[in-house]
Amino acid sequence: MNESSSIRSIPQSSSLRAEVERALSVAIISGELEPGTVVSVPGLATQFGVSATPVREAMLDLEKRGFVESVRNKGFRITTVGEDDLREIVQARRWLEVPAIRIAAEEFPENRLPEFRAMAEQIIRAAAAADFAAYLAADSHFHLELIALTGNRRLVRLVEELRSQTRMVGLAELKDTRELELSATEHHELLDLLVAGDADAAEKLLHAHIGHVLGWWAGLAEDQLETSTLPTK
């Protein structure tokens, strides 16, 4: 594994299972662990520098989430998420997040602007370092905090769950690319629009930003995608 790999030695703690699951989730979501790859519990335990037990427990949790499937006598295979699945997730996120950003634009608390700017800078730094674990964590924190401005805790949890199901299989391939840089800087642009109270422009930007899941982060050209309709079966 390279230095920026999500699968690396984990400091000993009381929640090794959760730490292993988080690291593996990032590796799967970002595409670092590609669909179809078979991994073994002993092999991962060695890479993480932990015993096999928390790794096995983490893999079983990931299996429940649909991220992996058991392969007899071999370990676990990273599952494939189809384009229709991604389109459904993107559409659901747009239905929930885009109206929420209008609410944030109408009553954005400017006293919290430095806090949100710091979050946006953290995203940019993580993107520049190709630290996908930090990038995904910072990106999720930023967007969930914006949604929390609506005061609706259930909405935050729903979006958090949808984000946890998202696969950005081309993200790892975006290291040192203009696309990853642009995606990161969009967070500052969104804040500019919120401070200005421009709800229409904020909605438009967030609609496109979420679409990166089907575009840049999936390794596809965004100008060739139409993600506004339900997937056809």
Image (cartoon, grey):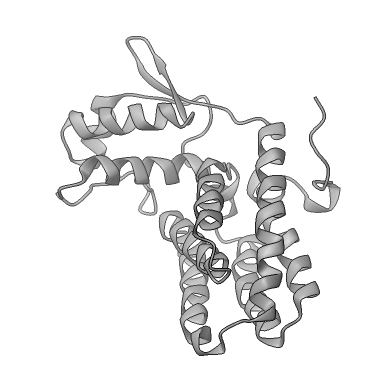
In the image, residue 176 lies at what x, y percent? 56, 61
Q: Is residue 72 above or below residue 83?
A: above
Depth check: give the residue in front, 18 or 112: 112
Task: Count the labels in the image.
Answer: 0
Residue found 37% across the figure and 48% down from its top: 6
In the image, residue 82 lies at what x, y percent? 66, 30
In the image, residue 58 lies at what x, y percent? 31, 34
Q: Residue furthest bottom?
A: 111
**Quarter-of-image position of residue 187:** bottom right
Rendered-image quadrant of the C terminus: top right
Depth check: give the residue in front, 124 or 211: 211
Residue 12 placement, left or right of 87: left
Camera sees residue 1: no
Residue found 15% across the figure and 48% down from its top: 14
In the image, residue 124 lies at what x, y percent? 52, 71
Q: Is residue 199 above or below residue 129?
A: below
Q: Is residue 224 above or below residue 43?
A: below
Residue found 49% across the figure and 28% down from its top: 66
Residue 10 placement, left or right of 197: left
Depth check: give the residue in front, 165 or 4: 165
Rendered-image quadrant of the N terminus: top left
Q: Is residue 204 above or below residue 27?
A: below
Depth check: give the residue in front, 143 or 108: 108
Residue 108 placement, left or right of 1: right
Camera sees residue 105: yes
Residue found 66% across the figure and 34% down from its top: 85
